[in-house]
């Protein structure tokens, strides 16, 4: 039989694309080389990291925050194997959910490594070495990304780990060295600090979280320092000596100079991720690539007819919800409908405590583009709910067009920022103005009132400040 669509990879891009295509009446297959569906996100990314962030946050709260609310706990004790089981059960529930959805939507799954041998033909090689060929009218490449490596430093996933190893450490390291102050470094660094590790983060640039609004990143760094994280900015790790019991990392100023040694039990390499297309056969097919990424047009089509690509393997932020939206858009386009992804309104969340969330342009980007903008800011110290909850760290910042008041960017650092950013995203999706947010009734008492107040602050009329 010939499928209408075969998706290679079942991460959030691939599995969502397959389901949407099946909903639209296509006969769909997926090819997956891992034993479970869900890709990086469900197996070794978003889901397990959030499970550990949730559990470790409650552990820290029980140790330090409960007493102030009149709850006496007799020194919470960490049971790491049980915490890992909690994480694994969360992953299991999610990956099984995808298998259920495939069945429900009558999507056939081929387990094995997929290689496109010609347009319309995929050879799937199973773990037993046996191959079968899938015939299909269209192919969507959704093979995701892999860990970026540091030259000369070998990741063994025990002592020198990527995010995958850092999600499964067998004991809490006394000293954890994090290389790269990006999303993974700060999320997983937070997990292990809360569980008792002393965490040192080495970052090449002179700031953390490149790409995020600088004011937010600076304030957030101070909050993490107050929690006990140490930062070495403008520095690079050039080598890690793992011959002894303790790792010895050579750390140099980014611009070059004398190296110092930082000792650690575990080193987490979190310097980014790279698109993954190994063994897919793209070079042989002549698929155009740029810096490892598959090049596509506005319809997610590669230069080879019938072959499309979405998610981490193409340009844009490496985020699960971006991959999902692309999966839906390409399925709808293949069905003759008008699929669409608005790249100007893709939210970005860091699930630490407090959370950091943003959508749209940063102040630096607006300055660079020469766009005149107004700023409205509101601190959580002036929000009633944050006061009672004692989650007053952080603020909301709204950037709107100086002439039209249209919202151009929203940046939040604070408890539950990740949930609150959605209202800003909806406002931006509808081309809303700061005034629209300011005139929208927000429930009291909630942290979201700070978003309304920041919108009021754009017009210089906040009530509680
Ligand atoms: P992937 O999820 O990477 O899936 C690709 C799939 O393709 C895999 O299952 C792989 O086995 C399969 N595959 C590859 N090649 C082949 C082949 N030749 N044949 C068959 N199968 C193949 N993003 C967020 O938005 N929020 C988060 O909180 C978040 N947390 C993260 C935490 C960590 C630790 C990491 C590492 C990432 C996190 N991300 C998060 C990023 C997110 O996981 C990715 O953006 C997302 O998974 C990309 O989806 P995808 O479908 O493009 O690819
Ligand atoms: P990242 O791109 O977020 O951060 C990497 C950091 O490492 C940057 O600050 C960079 O300047 C620094 N760096 C690069 N080379 C270095 C070197 N040699 N020495 C020191 N520092 C160096 O990458 P990260 O954290 O690995 O995450 C990968 C991707 O996974 C993210 O970009 C994001 O797309 C996704 N992700 C998303 C999450 C979320 O949405 N909450 C959570 C985790 C990952």
Image (cartoon, helix red, strand yellow):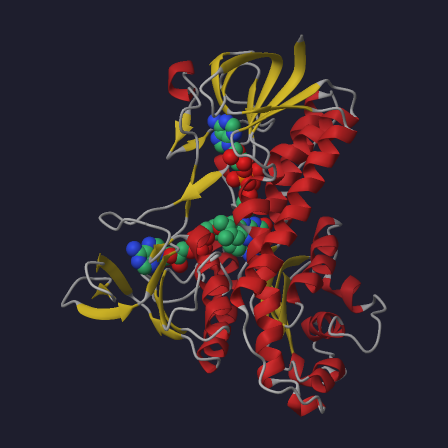
Front-most of 77 and 104? 77
| Left or right relative to 129: residue 260 | left
Which quadrant: the N terminus?
top right
Image quarter for residue 135? top right
Give the image location of residue 442, x and y in percent: 83, 70
Quarter of the image where one finds residue 407: bottom right
Quarter of the picture containing the C terminus is bottom right
Above or below, 58 relative to 185: below
153 sits left or right of 63 in the view? left
What residue lies at 59% left-to-right and 75% top-to-bottom?
Answer: 59
Q: Residue at x 64, y 53 (%)?
A: 89
- Determine if residue 142 is in view: yes
Left or right of 127 on screen, residue 359:
right
At a point 24% along the width and 65% down the height, the residue shown is 245
| Residue 76 located left or right of residue 108 | left
Identify the residue at the far top of this view.
1
**Is there any visible trace of residue 354 in the rendered image?**
no
Q: Is residue 323 above or below residue 415?
A: above
Report the front residue among 60 and 158: 158
Q: How many marks?
A: 0
**Residue 288, position in %: x, y?**
42, 23
Tell me what residue is drawn at x 42 percent, y 15 percent: 285
Front residue of this view, candidates 386 and 82: 82
Percent x, y of residue 236? 26, 61
Rendered location of residue 9, percent (x, y): 56, 31
Q: Quadrant of residue 175?
A: bottom left
């Amino acid at each position: 039989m010939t499928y209408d669509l075969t998706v290679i990879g079942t991460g959030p891009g691939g599995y969502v694309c397959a389901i949407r295509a099946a909903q639209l009446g296509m006969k769909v297959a997926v090819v997956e080389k891992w034993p479970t569906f869900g890709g990086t996100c469900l197996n070794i990314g978003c889901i397990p990291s959030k499970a550990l962030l949730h559990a470790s946050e409650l552990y820290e709260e029980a140790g330090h925050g409960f007493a102030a609310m009149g709850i006496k706990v007799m020194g919470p004790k960490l049971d790491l194997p049980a915490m890992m089981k909690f994480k694994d059960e969360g992953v299991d529930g999610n990956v099984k959910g995808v298998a259920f959805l495939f069945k429900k939507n009558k999507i056939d799954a081929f387990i094995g490594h997929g290689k496109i041998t010609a347009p319309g033909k995929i050879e799937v090689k199973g773990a037993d070495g046996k191959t079968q060929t899938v015939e299909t009218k269209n192919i969507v490449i959704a093979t995701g990304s892999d860990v970026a490596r540091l030259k000369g430093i070998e990741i063994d996933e025990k002592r020198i780990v990527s995010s995958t190893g850092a999600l499964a450490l067998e004991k809490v390291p006394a000293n954890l060295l994090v290389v790269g102050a990006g999303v993974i470094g700060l999320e997983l660094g937070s997990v292990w600090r809360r569980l008792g590790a002393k965490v040192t983060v080495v970052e090449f640039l002179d700031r953390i979280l490149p790409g995020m609004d600088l004011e937010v990143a600076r304030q957030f760094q101070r909050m993490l320092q107050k929690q006990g994280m140490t930062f070495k900015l403008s520095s690079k790790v050039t080598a890690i000596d793992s011959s002894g019991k303790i790792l010895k990392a050579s750390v140099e100023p980014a611009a070059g100079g004398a190296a110092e040694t930082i000792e650690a039990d575990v080193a987490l390499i979190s310097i980014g991720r790279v698109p993954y297309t190994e063994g897919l056969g793209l070079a042989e097919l002549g698929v155009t690539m740029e810096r490892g990424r598959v090049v596509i047009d506005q319809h997610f089509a590669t230069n080879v007819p019938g072959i499309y690509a979405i998610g981490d393997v193409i340009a844009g932020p490496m985020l699960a919800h971006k991959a999902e939206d692309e999966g839906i858009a390409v399925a709808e386009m293949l069905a003759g409908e008008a699929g669409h992804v608005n790249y100007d309104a893709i939210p970005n969340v860091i699930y630490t405590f407090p959370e950091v969330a943003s959508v749209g342009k940063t102040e630096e980007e607006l300055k660079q583009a020469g766009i005149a903008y107004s700023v409205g800011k509101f601190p959580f110290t002036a929000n009633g709910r944050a006061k009672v909850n004692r989650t007053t760290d952080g603020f909301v910042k709204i950037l709107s067009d100086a002439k039209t008041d249209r919202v151009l960017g929203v940046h939040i650092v604070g408890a539950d920022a990740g949930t609150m950013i959605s209202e800003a995203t909806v406002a931006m999706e509808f081309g809303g103005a700061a005034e629209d947010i300011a005139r929208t009734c927000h429930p009291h008492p909630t942290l979201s009132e700070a978003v309304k107040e920041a919108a009021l602050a754009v017009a210089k009329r906040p009530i509680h400040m």
